[in-house]
Image (cartoon, rainbow, N blue to C red):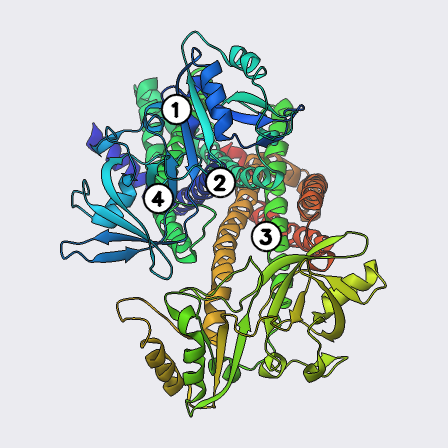
Amino acid sequence: MIKHYLKVISREIQQNWFRFLLNTLGISVGLLIFSFTYFLLLKARGKDVTSFKNHDRIVQITNSDSSGEKTYPVTNDDINRIMRLCISDFETVATISPVPFDGYVNVERPTGDFLPHSTSWIRSVNDEFFDIFNAEFLQGNNLYWENKTAVLSKSFAEKLFGNENPIDKNIELTDKTHHIFEVYRVVGVIKDIYVDAMGADIYISDSEVTTSPRVFALLNNKSTTEIVNQQLKNIPRVNGFDSQLIPTAKPISQKKSFLNQYDPFAVGLVLLSLLVLLSAIINFFNILVSSYITRNRQLTLRKIAGASQKYIFRQLICEIIPVLFISLLMSISFTEILLSQFTKLQIQNFPGINLYPQQIYYIQLCTTGFILILSIVLIVIFLNKTKKMLAAEGMRGFITVKPNKKILRNISLGVQLFFAFFLLSSTILLFNYYQKINSEEKIPLTRSDLNRIFAVPLLDFTLPDHHQEIINKIKTINVVEEVLQIGSFMPIGESFDNEMQSYFTVQTSYLLPDSIQCPITIICAEDNYFSFFNLNIQGIDISTLAPNDAIVTQSLMENIKSNSDTGSIDLGCGIYHIAGVVEEMPFVRSVKGGVWIKPPIPDITPGLYVKSFDGSENSTRKELMSIIREFVPESIPYKIENLYENQERVNGYPLAFYSIIGIISFFSLILALFGIYSAITVDTRRKQKSVAIRKINGAGRKDIYWLFGKLYIILLGVSFIISSAIIVLAWNNLSLDIPLKYRPNILFSLIATLIIVALFTTIVMLNKLNRISKTNPIDVVKYE
């Protein structure tokens, strides 16, 4: 029996290979886009709390204001008072604190040395944490939970120790200068917790770090959230907080409306991906229905020959399963490719994305199962209709569509047109926005100049202690033309590290007289900064610049003039007089502009740029690395890039990210256009008899074109208006924080979309109508 069905499936695929290919490709891309987007949203929102056994009895304790909308941290004093007051309502209480750590996790080896690894997520917890959240210990336990002990997640333990047993081995936490932060003994390994608020790579005792703890309590079976909140209102406030703050217990499984729980961008992203999936499913069902209708004669003959309804049902199911199965495999393959790209991009907003692909596969598997169920329902409806047909009616080969059901045909065409409009407009808007953002980057140097300027990070390892010595040695290199020091005196900033940044910058805000704040980029460097990067300054000679003078970019100056008549700017660390204007800071994408000031402290630890003579790039790099290796051992990774390599890498991340989106958008557009193609194909095939009768009655090609053209014109207009209205409303809400000069031309995208979709629809319609017009009407009527 199975062999027979395999032969039937093989014959159907060979006869209809193009339809089979488009179906599998369409569904696989739809599965990929929907599952990937939905997974990213889940990771970003951390909503998988139902994985905890007692999630309906776990509450989080926070301090809320009188309105209940804003929450504030719970202090240790609060925790003690809560425990004393509500001890009868709680089975146990867990505390979780984030550990501020930016350094290396080093693994002890048998030789006694420590092998460095990348940074990780660390949380300090009490021993009750593992009980409340059902932590599954795969190795070891937390029976001796004390200072200097740690529990690792399974994935992180495998990354550190491989197949070795990590229990009772030591891990060492160091900062980026390799100064030892602490040494911990591993006492357990637990199954990964995917919920972002509770998940981590390393768990340490809460007796060491209690910064801003999150407090969770497990209610007993008789208590409720309402009872606990009534008692929490009576807790006296003596810890210095606002007396209006009230401790409040909120269930972690508390349901909120979708729009309140997710921001508009996330909602739009998921809805867009869902539209892509729906487009693929509708295409699949359109072809499925068309196939069943055209094969009605074949199925009727099988019934006359004695085939039962069950036999026909199994045959149709066996034709669907290969399409869905291969689509699922293709979707998984595409997912692996995308995950590898995301790993290369090092996107930090979605931690663990390269560790937990099984969640994406689970979403794809569930979605495929849902499509299979819908297909079975469609088959049952079809078989129920054919069961009631007479054999003579079935031998006609087509199922007659009643006039009152033409609305379904119009809706099908309209939906496909809407998909095409929406997806194409969104794609054009996205790339227009990306183009505007990238066009703002100022690069005043030629490629040759970029290749001979090297960035030398001096803020890691032991280099800060020797930075002046290193600079003096670099200045003695005979192939070095010029050295530029760029530093910062602000308490917040981005330092050079192994990944290296283009600049040592500080993100802050300037204050205008009317208290308007605006984010900017501050650069403090030596006087040769502008000549080093070939920048022209308007208004002042750089050598005469006073310590309280500042040079601003043209974009920032325009913003200041529009809000204030004064010639000064408040940077939060002092008021600076605007002495000069420069066009834009090089390599800085700052939507509000930048400020250049002199370093107020002569011996600050700088970032360093070194410019070599033309043609001496390779020897300069070797000389620089040899000097650095005098202070940094070979065992520690260290890399020196020139500006061209730096820009290729830095710009490569967003470019690759947009390339991924572009590829997805391209496939989405192909799906939408294929949907239009399949809908028109089904529509013209169903109307062959009507066209044949009109031709017999003397209708010409223009009459036939108008028969279909007026319907498509109406559907194009309605779909365009609806999709345009949705896009305009959605974009206006999403682009509120985007400066006007970066906003893409939405009118251009809509008009371009209308032209492309209308042109494609017209070409497909004329092609199909020409085919059926050339068919002899007598043959069509006989066939019908």
Q: Which mark is residue 44?
A: 2
Is tag 4's residue or tag 1's residue first in the polypeptide sequence?
A: 1
Question: Label 3, on which residue?
Answer: 427
Secondary element at tag 1 = helix
Of the pair 295 and 314, the residue shown nearer to us: 314
The answer to whether marks 1 and 3 mark residues whose Cβ atoms lie closer than 8 Å is no
Q: CA distance from mark 4 to mark 3?
A: 24 Å
List x then y, in percent, for residue 11. Answer: 30, 40
Is tag 4's residue or tag 2's residue first in the polypeptide sequence?
A: 2
Identity, as a three-letter code, of the amino acid under mark 3: Thr
Identity, as a three-letter code, of the amino acid under mark 1: Thr
Is tag 4's residue or tag 3's residue first in the polypeptide sequence?
A: 4
Q: Quadrant of residue 525?
A: bottom right
Mark nearest the camera among 1 and 2 is 2
Crowding at dot 3, Cα within 10 Å, few <14 / some 14-19 / many 20+, comes out as many
Identity, as a three-letter code, of the amino acid under mark 4: Ile
Is tag 1's residue or tag 2's residue first in the polypeptide sequence?
A: 2
Q: What residue is drawn where x is 49% and y is 20%? A: 81
The answer to whether marks 3 and 2 mark residues whose Cβ atoms lie closer than 8 Å is no
Secondary element at tag 2 = helix
The answer to whether 176 is drawn above or below residue 258 in the figure is below
Q: Is residue 580 left or right of residue 34?
A: right
What is the total number of numbered labels drawn onto the structure image? 4
Identity, as a three-letter code, of the amino acid under mark 2: Ala
Q: Residue furthest left?
A: 110
Q: Is residue 65 left or right of residue 338?
A: right
Q: CA distance from mark 4 to mark 1?
A: 38 Å
Q: What residue is drawn where x is 46% and y is 9%? A: 223
